[in-house]
Each structure stands twice: as structure tokens, then as C-alpha cells.
Amino acid sequence: MLPDRSETAVFRTHSERETIEFGERLGRRIRSGMCLSLGGGMGSGKSVLVRGICRGLGVDDDVVSPSFILCEAYVGRLPVIHTDFYRLEFENEIEELGVFDQIDGETVVIAEWGGRSERWQDLADAVLELIVIGESDRRISVSYSPDVAHIFEER
Amino acid sequence: MRILAIDTSHPVGSISLTIDGDVAGSVRFGSAASHLVELGVSAARLIEDAGLDVSRIDRLALVTGPGSFTGLRIGMSYVKGLYAAMGTEVVTATSLKLLARQTPATGEVVCSMIDARRDEVYTAAYVTGDGGVGKEIVAPHTTVPAEFVCSLDRRATTFVGTGALRYREQIESTFVGPAEFVPEEENFPSTPFLGKIAGDLTPLTKKEVRCLEPFYIRPSDAKLKKIEER
């Protein structure tokens, strides 16, 4: 069954540090494998957000932008795959990268430019869109499945 | 003939060494991500335990897919690497056909079904003949199990594979003919079996090995959406 992303939320961050901290809070609340799709233009902070999510998931390694390396695997509390569809042209390249295989319920699979693939977008438990609204201000709109609501609902 | 048979198409992979049709050793290994680590180590161990070295292997038999994309590429790279280094003969079998052939079917049809995740299966069906599996009656494709099973006729059918295992209830409730299933552990491609039949398969030519690619059934050539710079 495809996730039903019927819930929405909007967040604001005012600096790179706040974006990392926001990601870290999300990462800390992730309890099991899931599929995340990140959108937003160049320099909107997608990789920064992923760095925070990974930190929250207990990843100690440096998290780098996968625009050129296409896919990077990390180990934290849960296995993490960080990928980027920016340089890919066809849907089957994503398939060949093996990232669809990684949506296995145990791995947190995060794709930057995830919206480029309709299939990826369909499979995502949450879609996060980063919008630049000032030099360091970002609006982060999220649509998510009720199954992962605990990650996005601030208490 | 000494044959190394390799399957990395499933989360549980396996490798077997057969010598003149007898299984000299067989290893199964864990998750798709670990195939990369375990395939080479397992191969080395099997060869060493048999008192051989890799130059004494006559033939490599590989399962080409469909299955895990990551796993398939690992097996494929391994075999191509050995071929490049040693010139060892290569034969191949698809996971669907192998499953059908290894199944001692009692019905008229064998339907292989491999779990493709996301509620889909890779499937193909074959009629059973005197000497085992015969003509392919449904070509390999990806489908939703219940929908596909409805399209089959009432001939007695043996369902095999991880998809048959996973969707057994759906198959039983939608299939109109008599359905049979195999014991749980027999739903994976068997490399001991592949090793036994590999001696009768025709080795690929140099060009065929060079052009060999994993058998992905899900080739979606859809172009990704254009990137809008902001």
C-alpha cells in the first residue's frame, strides 16, 4: 500500500544552524525505516537538513551532499541511505542505483530532488519542501502519512 | 566438471560448488547489502574446502534475475570479474525459470512468483512436461498477484517463489484451479540445483559475457521530471 500523506505542517528556520537543529529533532523521533523525499531549489538547504536528520539518528560520520556521488550509506541507530536524483535522467537509473531496494522497513532512505521521480514521490512517507524566503530564512512544508505523524508533530 | 553456481537475486543469496554433478559444498548468506561482502568470501571458502584453487573451476553459473537490483549487480560483477581474470566459462539462468525447473511439480503448470515488494511480484509460468519444465506460457513480467492469478486458467498449478510464499492466501482465494505450494525453504533459487543442470547449458560467447546485464523486468524508461532552477 502506498502511504497516504494526508497530514501537512509548515515550519520556519532562520539560519543554517536552525535547519540542522530542526533536522536533528526529526531524526531523533524516527523510530523505524521510512522513505523521505526532499525538494527545494539549489542552495535551499536540503543537504543541511539531511545532516541534521542523520545527526538525530545517531550518525557520527560527516554527511556530504550526494549530488556527485549519487548515494551514500550511513549507520546510526538505523541504517541510513542518502541519495540525490539531481544528476539522474531516467527513472531506471534510480532503480539501478538500488535505492528502491532499500525501502525495506528498516532503512531510513532520504532522496534529495525526490520529486523528480513520480514513483519515489508515491512511495515517500513524508515529502519535505524547502523554500528560500530570505538569505538564511527557510520555510519547510511537509506532507506526511499519519503513520509517521510523531516525527512532525511538535509536542 | 567443476561448477560454481551463484544466486544473489534474493535477500538470501547462495553459492554452491558442484563437481561432476555432485554438490561439494553450498553456502547461504544474509541480506542484500551483505552479498557484496559474503559472496567472494564464501566462494573462496568453498573452493579451498574442496582442495581446489580458482583456476580449477571450469564453469560459472549465474542467476541473472529478476530480483534485487543491488544483489543482481553484485553477482553479475563478480562473475564478469572472474571471467575477465580467468576466462572461466559462463552460463546463466533466470530466477523464474530456475525456480520452475527445481520444483518437483505434480500439476500441469508451474508458476514462479518472486516478491518484488510494494505489493507486486515478478512472475512467469511454464507447462510441465515429461522431463520437467517445458514451454513458457506466461512471459516474465511484473504484476499484482491477485489480479494475475485471476487471469490463469484452471489447470492444476504449483506456485513457487518468495511471492507465492508471501501471497499464498491471496492465491488460494483467487485461483480457480487446484493450487499447490512447496515447503517454505524451497521458495528460493537453488544453487545446488543450478550447479547440477549448468553442465548442460550452453556457455556464453565472449561478446555475450561482455554484453551480459542483469535481467531487470522493471525497466522504467520514464524520463525524470525536469529540474526547475530556483
Image (spheres, rainbow, N blue to C red):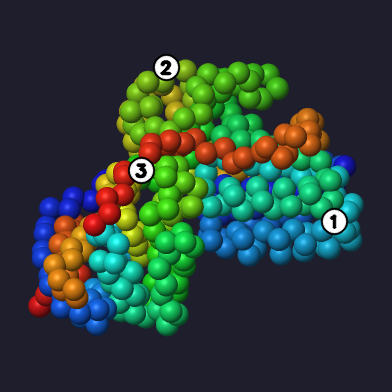
Name the amino acid, label 3: Leu
Residue A70 % position (x, y): 46, 59
Q: Earlier in the sequence, mark 3 or mark 1?
A: 1
Relative horizontal placement of residue B107, taking residue B152 as reference (left or right): right
User: In the image, is residue B119 above or below residue A65?
Assistant: above
Is the residue marked by circle 2 packed among few (<14), some (14-19), or many (20+) residues within 10 Å? few
Residue B139 image point, x, y percent: 51, 24
**Does residue B165 appear in the picture of this structure?**
no
Mark 3 to mark 1: distance in Å?
Answer: 43 Å
Residue type, label 1: Val
Mark 2 sits on what residue? B153
Quarter of the image containing the C terminus of chain B?
Answer: bottom left
Asked whether the beta carbons under mark 3 and mark 1 sit within 8 Å of each other, the answer is no
SS under mark 3 = loop
Q: Which mark is drawn over residue B224?
A: 3
**Horizontal relation, residue A139 to residue A33: left or right:** left
For the image, the number of numbered tags is 3
Q: Residue at x 27, y 47 (%)?
A: A122
Name the residue at 49% across, 35% down: B217
Q: Chain of mark 1?
A: B
Q: Quadrant of residue A119?
A: top left
Q: Which residue is mark 1?
A: B54
